[in-house]
Image (cartoon, grey):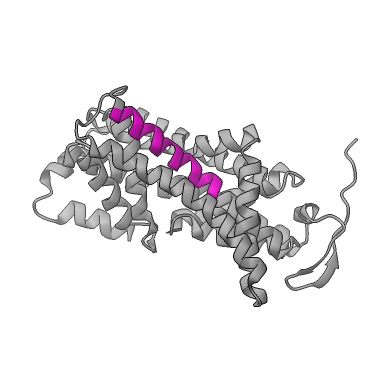
Amino acid sequence: MVGLVVALVTLLPGLGSLRESFKGGKVSWLLLGAVLELLSCASYVIVFRGVFCKRMSWRTSTEIGLSELAANSLLSVGGAGGLALGAWILRRGGVPAGQIARRTVAFFLLTSLASVGFLVLGGLALLSGLLPGPSNPLLGALPVVAGVGAIALALSAGAAARVLGTGSTRPRAQAVLAAIGEGVEEAVLLLRSPAVVLGSAGYMLFDLAVLGVCFPAFGNPAPPVVALLLAYIVGQLGGLVPLPGGIGGLDLGLIGALVLYGVDATDAAVAVLAYRGLLLAIPAAIGLPALASLQRRLRREDHDIAACAPDQEVEVVGLGMVRMPVPRPRR
């Protein structure tokens, strides 16, 4: 898919201005973008560890978190690919399915909350004129309404799931509804953790900064901060299309949103393609080796995932029912 995109940009007629824009790219800016993407990945690991299990070692937390990021870079479906891989790893390591389910819900909500929160703040800043940007009031009002509505929907979904779960007679439906209700509750409680809040914000803001530096990297002016912020968040909706690496859906979503907020179409296309190259390359480059290392440790049972379920008897994939050991206190 990546090769196809490169071939199309290189060979198709009518894209001469786009090809010219890629000439003379500044390596220093692109290196800065790579560092910012690494910081975004580190923030993701911090959130993962804070939500799923603080008893795990940093090595295990880092390997699982980076493995999820690699999965997200290869199959971008709103982050579902990485969450599915992480759930399998935790289940293989002995964490009960119910615990994984509710923590997955909480993790998804907390990593999405940063985008929704900044969507509301960006819309308010644009509406009030606090930051420069497009003059169309709808471009500020709609993000505010959408962001507030998303937060209200998440909270009401948690309450509704708890009510429906108590009245359901189907065990599987009860389990799903319980995971949603308890996951929303845990997400609200975890907002008290500075590490989780800062990690969630850093995961989004560092990634946004990568897109920002891809404009001057090719000699193009960076958009106003609020326009870049809102276009980035709105454009991410294109990543919900289940395409390999999100190629096509996320790219077109970002370019379209940037143009909507007043960015030149050619400048937007150049920046987005460079940003997507970093977004595909960096997480895969560090995540795939982490996954390979974790797979070897899982086969040897040389990991501490079981510390997340101390003294519980759980079914471990491939081993049957196993009682998890109680971690020894550190000296």
In the rendered image, residue 192 lying in the magenta stretch gets the answer no
- Quadrant of the snapshot with the C terminus: top right
The image shows residue 19 at horizontal and vertical percentages of: 17, 44
Q: Is residue 184 left or right of residue 235?
A: right
Residue at (56%, 62%) from the top-left corner? 84
**Residue furthest bottom in the image:** 170
The spot of residue 306 in percent (x, y) is: 79, 56
* Near-viewer residue (250 or 96): 96
| Residue 118 falls inside the magenta stretch | yes
* 122 or 223, nearer to the observer: 122
Q: Is residue 244 left or right of residue 302?
A: left
Q: Residue at x 13, y 56 (%)?
A: 12
For the residue pair 25 and 143, the one nearer the viewer reads as: 143
The quadrant of the rendering that contains the N terminus is bottom left
Q: Position of residue 323 (x, y in %)?
A: 87, 64
- Residue in the picture at 67% in, 47% down: 61
Report the label total: 0
Main secondary structure along the magenta-highlighted residues:
helix
Task: Check the image and report above or below for 43 versus 155.
Answer: above
Question: Residue 91's quadrant in the figure?
Answer: bottom right
Determine the residue located farthest toward the left in the rendered image.
14
Q: Can I make out residue 214 in this image?
A: no
Residue 126, compared with residue 189, is above or below; it is above
Which residue sits at x=33%, y=38%? Answer: 230
Residue 188 sits in quarter: top right
Q: Residue furthest top?
A: 130
Q: Where residue 255 sits: x, y (%)?
A: 25, 46
Numbered range of the magenta stretch: 109-127
Indicate the quadrant where residue 133 lies.
top left
Whether residue 147 is visible: yes
